[in-house]
Image: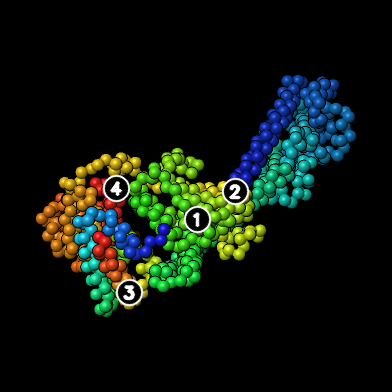
Amino acid sequence: MSHNTRDNLRDFFNRYSETRRLSLYQALVKELGNIRGQTKCVDSTDSFNSLKHQFKGICRYTCLEFDAQIDAIMTPAQLYSAVDNMFGHAVAIEDEL
Amino acid sequence: MTAVIMTLFIYDSLNEFKGDHDKKVATLMAFNQENYLQHRLIMNAMRSFFKSSEGVKKAEFEVFTQELLGERKALLFTLTPELTRGYISDDRDLEQLDSLVINLDKAGNLSGVLPHYQLIVLDIDEPNMPYLFYGIPLENLFFNINKLKGTCLKYSSSQLSAESQGCGIQLASMLSGMFRYTTDLDISIPEYNFYYTLGVESELRSSRLIEFMCMVLAILFICVLVFVLLYFKLVNKHLFNRIERENKFNVAMVSSINHEIRTPINALLGYSQMLRGMPKISDEHSVIIDKMLWSANLLYSVAENTLNYSKSTTSTLVLNNAPINTRQCIDNIHDYYNKLSIPAGKTLNFHISDKLPAVISVDSSKLFQVITNMINNALKYSTGKAVCCHIDICQRTGFNEESIIRGYYLRILIQDSGLGMSKSTKELLINPFTVDAESKLKQVSSIGLGLYTCNKLLAQIGGKLRLHSVKNEGTKIMLHFPCQFDSSSLSQQSKSVNYCNMRILIVDDNSFNLEVCNAMLVEKQFNTVCANSSKVALSQFVNTEPDVVIVDYQLDEMNGLELITKMKCIQANAQTQYFILSANDKNEIADSECHPDIYFMQKPFNTAIFLSCLGKNN
């Protein structure tokens, strides 16, 4: 019963009504885009940790959170990669919502 | 202290010995008084005899004196004015008078000395024989004295000095001589010119002396023993304090090491997970990655066990109960094994009871650790293929013998179908680090800590681990994990409550989190208002006057606690209930203890937990 990121995202959105799904989706994409954009210009450890914390929060809500995986992110580049990866999966399922 | 006790004892004993001596003196005085009266009576009788008779004849004298003296061996004799012998009470004593020495001083006073006799001279009314001598033999002087053991009587007068038989023997005993008491009594009968001194010496009897010495030695021994025991108690106390300090230091050190170890293990797990999620990973590599994940998890479990082992051996384990969504907690365990890819050929099945309430209060991290430890053991060591985990809830009295209070317990049964555990493996429950020399799984690495730690952990938090293993049938492990469950909350949950009149202000600067939280609450018919910044939140707070405020801890301009403090200042509505939502545990938030009226909920927002806390006083 191994779910990948995309399946988990689908499961998450399917819990809500169709009208609610769209607003949730837009909020998710907006936040992921913000984090991804800010990760590019991270200039301090504090701002990096803040972005990582925000990403961790999103992962928890979408049941994608795997603490070990988030803890493994040590650099802005890794964070960017992880956020971009999730952003890509979210965009990919847009038509299904 | 010993000196004080000894001084008191010796002082008391000496007083007692002196009291004994005084009693002896009093007894002797009584005897002497009796003798004194008898002698006085005899002398008075003789005087009266001569006074009332004229020309006393020898035969009359003899008859009278023999009647008077009776069995006494005393002498009565008279002397003529020329100091020649007159009458004598008994002619058989005439020979003794040969050694009589008479002395007449210048004042005309007559005195005499007769060996072995104390002579008393009486002037009598008889012109032919004006001098009457009363001779008291020495043996009569010491009459009855020998009846008192350990007593020496010394008689001393102008005529003779004598002492009783016991005096020589007493002197020979040097030790008892240390406890010798002497009393001199001056006795006089002036009308007969008779003066003498009676010296009484008594010393401690040997039996009393032995008793006294034994008591002294016993007191000395007891005092020394008490001091030795006190000394060892002090030494032990110091040792205990030192061990306690060392234990605390060890736990701190193990915690520190554990923290340092877990960070790279987490990284290893994370990278392995990322690696597995990457495209174009061959099946062969996938198997290797799964093994890496499995091993890293076991390593993580060992690190956790080591920390809990240290804590359990020093009794510093405490339960950190918090409301959790039961299903979600069990799903987490389920997901843990799904993501791990359990060893090839083995299966793990979960059976969850329908009776499990949606929300219980439990220490979820310790519950997770105990369950995964036992399942890991079953997957790792069991020779069987299937491992089953049954979870339900029960109510029963505590496992402590004195406990009579019924409490709720999560009951977890982990069952495998292997060959069963050997006797020495079962010993791991009470004796960690035991190695089973006969085990067929010797090649499987193990430090024997998991079973012991879980058993100890459960015992310390009031739970119980029961192990039942049958050869060739498998092993069953029953865990009773204490939890708290408000049965009334379940009935409340089952009722359809209308929340449409309840206004909730949700504050989060992350629009996605805000939207999800809002969606969950709208689904429950709550009347929600959202704010994506603290400034907007304060404005909405004034306008809507919400019944409940849910605030994210990390906001843009201030933290959640600061925002709630401002809200409390703005509005005096004490009915408003505040919740803080944070990705961190309550203990990790500074000053969280200073706000007992605020509920701390861990992200992600969970409706069941929220509803269980709603309307309660924290």
Query: Where on the picture, by quarter, is residue B406?
Result: top left
In the rendered image, is residue B214 in sight? yes
Q: Which disc is residue B612 wearing?
A: 4
Q: CA distance from mark 4 to mark 2?
A: 43 Å
Q: CA distance from mark 1 to mark 3?
A: 34 Å
Q: Which disc is residue B122 wearing?
A: none
User: Which mark's residue is nearer the viewer, 1 or 4?
Assistant: 1
Identity, as a three-letter code, of the amino acid under mark 2: Glu
Above or below for A12 versus B158: below
Of residue B318 and residue B126, the one placed in the foreground of this image is B318
Residue at 74% in and 22% down: B49
Q: Are marks 1 and 3 on the same chain?
A: no
Identity, as a three-letter code, of the amino acid under mark 4: Ser
User: Which mark's residue is nearer the viewer, 4 or 2?
Assistant: 2
Residue B528 x, y percent position in the rendering = 17, 53
Q: Are marks 2 and 1 on the same chain?
A: yes
Are the two marked residues, 1 and 4, in contact with CB atoms closer than 8 angstroms?
Answer: no
* Image quarter of the N terminus of chain B: bottom right
Are the two marked residues, 1 and 3, in contact with CB atoms closer than 8 angstroms?
Answer: no
- The chain to which mark 2 is attached is B
Identity, as a three-letter code, of the amino acid under mark 3: Ser
Helix, strand or loop status at disc 4? helix
Q: Which residue is mark 3?
A: A81
- Which circle's residue, 4 or 2, is located before the other in the chain? 2
Q: Are marks 2 and 3 on the same chain?
A: no
Q: CA distance from mark 3 to mark 4?
A: 38 Å
